Image (spheres, helix red, strand yellow):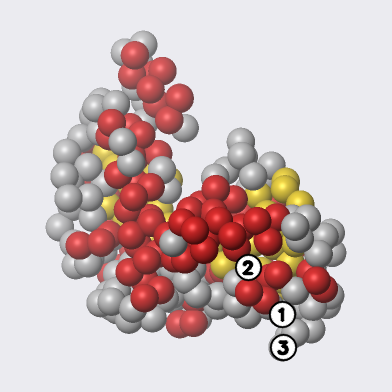
Amino acid sequence: MVLRVTNEAKAGAGRGDIVDGTSTSAALKREGLLMQFTPPHDLQPAFVDKDRFWIANNLYVMTPGFNTSLVPKGTEPKTYEDLLDPRWKGKIAWTVPPANMLAPQFVGLVIAAMGEEKGKDYLRKLAAQGIVGHSVSGRQMLDLVIAGEFPLALQIFNNHTVISAARGAPSDWVPMEPALGLLSVASVTKFAPHPNAAKLLMEFLVSEEGQRLMAASGELPVHPRVPPNDPRLRPRSEEHTSELQSLAYLVCRLLLEKK
């Protein structure tokens, strides 16, 4: 997406009014290809760019997910240390570049949570578990788990397990702390062919009405008055003061604002 928008802009043929994604806006902001605009909103400061180039429209919480037919509920690993149990050797998978950056983000989260020395020691032990890497999306990785390819996967979208379970799939997630929270953010492009329509859509996306539609689709809204369908999915503490949220949003904002 970043390459497409950048190339279109260089050719003077920009076609997109709005861009959306977890890291797209950060890259385009650095390239000077976004309009400085955020609509009126009721969102917490953590969900809005301090320079007003992007605003969040939903949240992703990355956690382990598992196949409930292969891993009966109650026997799943509940902590990072549990992942080191020999019973999980060769049975854990995760997504790797170039498909996405979820595996590196997991590594970064461990280092941020445990400190460099302890974090690296933990990661060496985890590597000995023979984690299998696949260059697929987080959604596709969960589908592999549901299909029985692996009992357990790291860094899947926790709400996707609930969506799939509602359709009869053997899927569930683990509220393992700390977890990584990723913001899906939207921006108006600097060359938007329909800038006023783009601004109106941005305003609707973060409105209470738009956020209720987001929740109805099974995604995690960011509006303070709109709960997700399953309240367990969104990190606790609406003020984002818990250990889980403070660390998750710290890592997320570092990803969005990286130089």
Q: Secondary structure at mark 2?
A: strand
Cα distance, mark 3 to mark 1? 6 Å
Image coordinates for residue 62, horizontal then vertical, percent: 53, 63
Crowding near the residue tagged with mark 2, few <14, some 14–19, many ≥20 C-alpha atoms within 10 Å: many
Whether 107 is drawn above or below 78: the answer is above
The picture quadrant where one finds residue 18 is top left
The quarter of the displayed image where residue 13 is located: top left
Which is more toward the observer, 245 or 120? 120
Amino acid bearing label 1: Glu
Which of disc 2 and disc 3 is earlier in sequence?
Answer: 2
Mark 1 secondary-structure assignment: loop
Residue 155 visible? The answer is no
Q: Which residue is mark 2?
A: 64
Badge 1 local density, few (<14 within 10 Å), some, or many (20+)?
Answer: many
| Callouts 3 and 1 close, C-beta under 8 Å | yes
Q: Earlier in the sequence, mark 2 or mark 1?
A: 2
Residue occupying image coordinates x 70% and y 70%? 84
Q: Residue at x 48, y 53 (%)?
A: 108
Q: Position of residue 107 (x, y in %)?
A: 54, 54
Report, in whole angstroms, how far the alpha carbon at label 2 lies from the one at label 1.
10 Å
Question: In the rendered structure, are the residues bearing label 2 and label 1 in contact, judged by CB atoms less than 8 Å apart?
Answer: yes
Q: Is residue 142 left or right of residue 80?
A: right
Q: Which residue is mark 1?
A: 76
Mark 3, other Cα within 10 Å: few <14 / some 14–19 / many ≥20: few
